[in-house]
Image: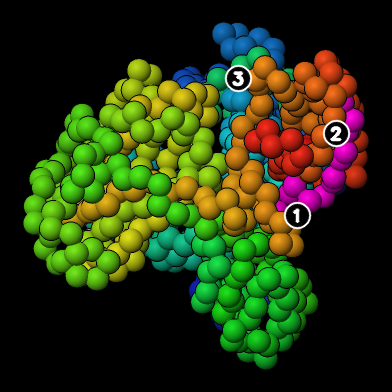
Amino acid sequence: MKNVFSISTLLLSFTLSTVSFGQCPTLVWSDEFDGSSLDLTKWEPQIGDGCAEGICGWGNNELQYYKAENAIVSNGTLKIVAKKERVRNKAYTSARLRTKNLANFTFGRFEARIKLVNGQGFWPAFWMLSANEPYGGWPESGEIDIMEGLGQHVNEVFGTIHYGDPYPANQFQGTDFKLYDNTFDQEFHVFAVEWEQNVIRWYVDDVLYQTKTSSDVSPYNWPFDANNQMYLLLNLAVGGNLPGSPDGSTSFPSQMEIDYVRVYDGGFNPSISGDRLVPYQASGEIYSINNAPQGSSYAWSLPVGASITSGTGSSSITVDWGDTGGDVICNVSTNCTTKQYKINVKVEPDFTYDFSFENFDQAANININEVTGSLTEVNNPDPSGINTSVLNAQYIRNNQEQFDIISYSTTAIDNASLYSEGMNKFYMDILTEAPIGTEIIIQLENSSVASPSNYPAGRHSRYIGKVTQNGSWERIAFDFLDQPDASTDPSTVDQIIVLFAPNTLTGDTYYWDNFDGYKADNGSMGIGSSDGRVGNSSRTLEESPIDNKDFSIAVFPNPANDYLKLNIDSEYEGIINLEIINFNGQVVKALTLKTSAGYSQYEISLDKLPAGIYYIKETSMNQNFSQKLIKN
């Protein structure tokens, strides 16, 4: 690809032409942060609380005052530091940097290697806005969020586009990327987008996880075209609509650390793609190396228990999984580079039917509160295949409602964390002519907190399913999406919201039935708080701290660094066996503790364990104890 760019005293403007397949990428702009201060020829620090720009709180009710001094360059990295200090009427300070009118871009690959921040109320971001606003102000000329994170959810980041009409008719689309075996504050990760004329692709560590095209935003204008010059931003917000406010657990000062920011022309390097969360013993899963030139070589390797059924030595393989996950690795040699590409895959537990929320044949476990579309009980329009029942629901979506809802009250969810931690799962039968890929969201709420005007308050968790076929019934499994308000007590969830095609103005008809809850089979391995299996021995990881008259265990600190303390209170003398199990279900540490009657305290070394998420499981006293542990 050829660069076409103009240079003046104050402005670099890059317009990068159409991708030439197999051409090696060319670095056209970068900051490696190798100096001792911020390069002001590349970055402009923004100052204040947004009021001077007419968007007090920076348009998001943020709580910080931005200062140039909070952007520190040292030891080869940029640190954006959030502090608890009062400036004017703000209780916190941080930094926000932009390249506007120093370097504007049209098309290319934009990437940064960043270590994120841990703590309630932090909102780190690497993103793009329009410099020349060819279609008007925000969001008409677009916004590309390359990466947004939430300090309280440090295993998850988001990639999003904003577009559409002026607020409040603005539109957005995006998705998240989760780490299953680590958190984004523990080490650096590369966040990137590739922007072309009619497509944007999102990556984390060269894993392709989302693609948006001009057709996805129809009937709205796709503002990300050749007329648009966009600039880069880096910032660490404190508080705001998305993360909520800091609390007593939030540590100050805290920092977002950036190793580099780089911009390449469109001769893009390869990437890897495929499902990162797969069903128990899934078969036919496809993993691919994208954008590699002809003549490239591929060497694939899989974790134990998985097998390649076709494609060995090619750019795309088909994989059958067992009951454990791990890394799918491909060593790729091209005319540009030799590099290893890796995608971490988690295998779900084997879910079995537990009960039905609503199947129109038996008494329901949910009751209707509110419907913004049209919901009726009808005869099955196609009693065949997976659904031969007589009755089901017909739902006609209200095309005047951007977030059209069916609201139910329920007493059937005693502990919503069983769903968010992967021990339980929602399923639903769907028949529709809505487009393939249409999203359906299930949202769990505390009705005494959540209201239409205070999102995300009271929303414990969300789950996503997608339409994959038209014209016949299909069974849709709903995967955990996110926790809009993680502070919501999981025992207080008493409301279920179902959203067909949220964030659209469509009017499709959906027939649905057998809205069921499933639970993890204790004999299978899964992610999160489900089961872990090593060899032929299964580990039931249902997170259930013990606290009864005979026996109790307390685990602290959590998150932990190099050590962990266990307080054990027992009425009996005896031996306790504990296992620390990683997210692949492997026992990484086994402990045998001799306890006396009464109170005992133990200190356990964790310095040999890599950072990540683990579970502590008691295996000897049949006390049904397991506890999630985060190792920093």
Tell me if 139 is positioned left or right of 580 in this view.
left
Q: Which residues are magenta?
A: 581-595
Q: Which residue is mark 2?
A: 575
Q: Nearer the viewer, residue 342 or 444?
A: 444
Confirm whether the magenta stretch covers residue 579.
no
Amino acid type assigned to the residue bearing label 2 in the image: Ile
Upstream in the sequence, badge 2 or badge 3?
3
Q: Nearer the viewer, mark 1 or mark 2?
A: 2
- Res 430 label: none
Residue annotated with mark 1: 586
> What residue appears at the point 65 percent right and 36 percent down from the top-left corner?
624
Q: CA distance from mark 2 to mark 3?
A: 42 Å
Main SS category, magenta section: strand
Tell me what residue is drawn at x 71 percent, y 47 percent: 182
User: How many discs mark residues in the rendered view?
Assistant: 3
- Magenta span contains residue 588: yes
194 vs 341, nearest the viewer: 341
Q: Give the residue type that dot 3 points to.
A: Pro
Please report whichever mark, 1 or 2, sits nearer to the chain's N-terminal start.
2
The three-letter code of the residue at mark 1 reads Gln
